[in-house]
């Protein structure tokens, strides 16, 4: 996930988080503090970001990844993607139709009901009140004001 043409983060197996500040010429590992595989990372600016993954793991940083700390998801299901529409409001898509929502920067997460048991794999928002989540077997769900 990139912030600009120079700064980006990538995540992977065993809690790996990589960061580049030079457009990908060099990558440096950041200590996530977890060993579970990470599936997605999202930054709202160069300092504040979150990563999610296997066993309901969520980690966050407010210093560009120099320090990561665990957040409580309330689930052991795999979390596949996340998207923050602001520094405080974010969404997570997970296995078996799991959607999580926060309005306090991830200090607390609440389940957002969605009528599916399919694994949800990707999220995208064009505005805080307009987004989509997609999943296995062609599942597509829309979120919007009044829906």
Image (tube, rainbow, N blue to C red):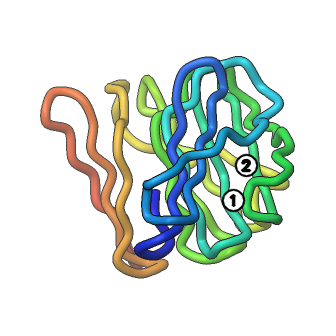
The x, y position of residue 34, in whole percent, is 77, 25
Labelled disc at residue 88? none
> In the image shown, does 70 or 104 lie closer to the viewer?
70
Q: Residue at x 84, y 55 (%)?
A: 107
On-image quarter of the C terminus: bottom left
Q: Which of the 4 image quadrants contains residue 59?
A: top right
Q: Are marks 1 and 2 in contact (CB under 8 Å)?
A: yes
Q: Which residue is mark 1?
A: 102
> In the image shown, does 82 or 142 lie closer to the viewer?
82
The x, y position of residue 83, in whole percent, is 50, 59
The x, y position of residue 101, in whole percent, is 62, 55
Vertical order, 8 against 27 (above or below): below
Labelled disc at residue 109? 2
Residue at disc 1, secondary structure: strand
Q: Residue at x 72, y 42 (%)?
A: 30
User: Residue placed farthest to the front in the image?
Assistant: 25
């Amino acid at each position: 996930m990139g912030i600009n043409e120079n700064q980006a983060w990538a995540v992977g197996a065993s809690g790996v988080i990589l960061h580049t500040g030079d457009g990908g010429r060099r990558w440096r590992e950041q200590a996530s503090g977890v060993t579970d595989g990470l599936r997605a990372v999202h930054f709202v600016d160069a300092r504040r970001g979150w990563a999610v993954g296997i066993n309901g793991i969520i980690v966050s940083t407010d210093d560009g990844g120099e320090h990561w700390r665990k957040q409580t998801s309330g689930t052991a299901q795999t979390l596949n993607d996340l998207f923050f529409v602001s520094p405080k409001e974010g969404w997570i898509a997970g296995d078996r139709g799991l959607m999580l929502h926060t309005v306090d920067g991830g200090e607390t997460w609440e389940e957002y009901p969605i009528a599916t048991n399919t694994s949800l794999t990707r999220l995208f928002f064009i505005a805080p009140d307009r987004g989509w989540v997609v999943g296995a077997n062609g599942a597509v769900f829309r979120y919007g004001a009044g829906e």
